[in-house]
Image (cartoon, rainbow, N blue to C red):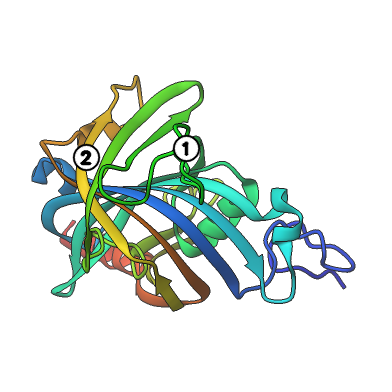
Amino acid sequence: MLKGYTLPRTPRGTSSLAPLPPWHYVGNAIAVEFDAAPTAAAAFLPEGLELHSGRCAAYFVEWQYASDTGEEYLDPIRSQYRETIILLSASFEGAPVAYCPFIWVDQDVSLMRGLVQGWPKQIGSTWITRAYDLPSKAAPVVGPGGRFGATLSAKDRRLLEAQVTLREVTETLPSPGFAKAVNTRYFPELVAGKHDSPAVHELVQLKSRDVRVSPVWKGDAALKIFDHPYLELPDLKPASVLAGYRFSFALTVDDLIPLRDLRADTQAADDRATAVE
């Protein structure tokens, strides 16, 4: 009998790309809040979500991960990765939520875990300025005047650049936040005649637990989104940049909240169209 939470499933089940949840994470983040054109942001939202505002956020995160029974961080290549996340401000049935149209990661294990949760992950290269416990010209302070940079590239093209200069501690996290984001789980069908009928198409909401957040530093920020020949990220270019943040946080993921089966909505719409004809 083959075992494993994800493919590949094998006799002992130890070769799965992503192991059985729970998944424990800790990370250092640089975040930038910005406003995009509301009509452009709204165009990215799936059925079931409405635009709350043009407020967006870009997160650049250095993560470290461990499973419930393992100590993957002792083999750092299995545990560490970097990620860039774009979030939009949306609402679901009147309640404010976040929605992710784009996300890039540099590890296949993280990509698999993300696809299970509905994050639309792609492979990309994220780099973030690091702070250290010793004062040095080679590192910023986590305090007033500390300057941090972050970049994202994918397929040899620069996509994003950000800089943050810290000013003060704040009680407020960047908005929109991603701990309880709403995602679209989507898996297409390859059977002939069913290419327009996905095997999985549903809205889900993340359900994190044991969330811990360090002191949050806030300051001034700059963000640039570069033009691209086919990627639609430039549609979300900042109309204005609002603020930058630097903080650390930890959370555990082992659950998901199904919100709506979008296949049923599509079938109902097709049935109505057929009845009209």
Residue for point 56% across, 50% down: 111
- Expressed as whole percent of the image width and height from the top left, the position of residue 231 reads 35, 29
Note whether 7 is above or below 153 in the view shown: below
Is label 2 in a helix, a strand or a loop? Answer: strand
Mark 1 Cα-neighbour bin, 10 Å: few <14, some 14–19, many ≥20? few
In the rendered structure, which amino acid carries the disc numbered 2? Ala
Instruction: Identify the residue under disc 1.
Output: 136
> Residue at coordinates 37% horizontally, 28% vertically from top-left?
159
As drawn, 233 above or below 32? above
Relative depth, front residue between 192 and 128: 128
Q: Is residue 43 visible?
A: no
Residue 237 picture quarter = top left
Left or right: 146 as drawn, with respect to 65: left
CA separation in Å, label 1 and label 2? 23 Å
According to the picture, the residue beneath numbered tag 2 turns out to be 221
Identify the amino acid type marked 1.
Ser
Residue 171, x across and y down, in percent: 22, 69
Residue in the image at 71% along x and 48% along y: 77
Q: Is residue 29 left or right of residue 169?
A: right
Regarding mark 1 in the picture, which secondary structure is present there? loop
N-terminal of the pair, mark 1 or mark 2, is: 1
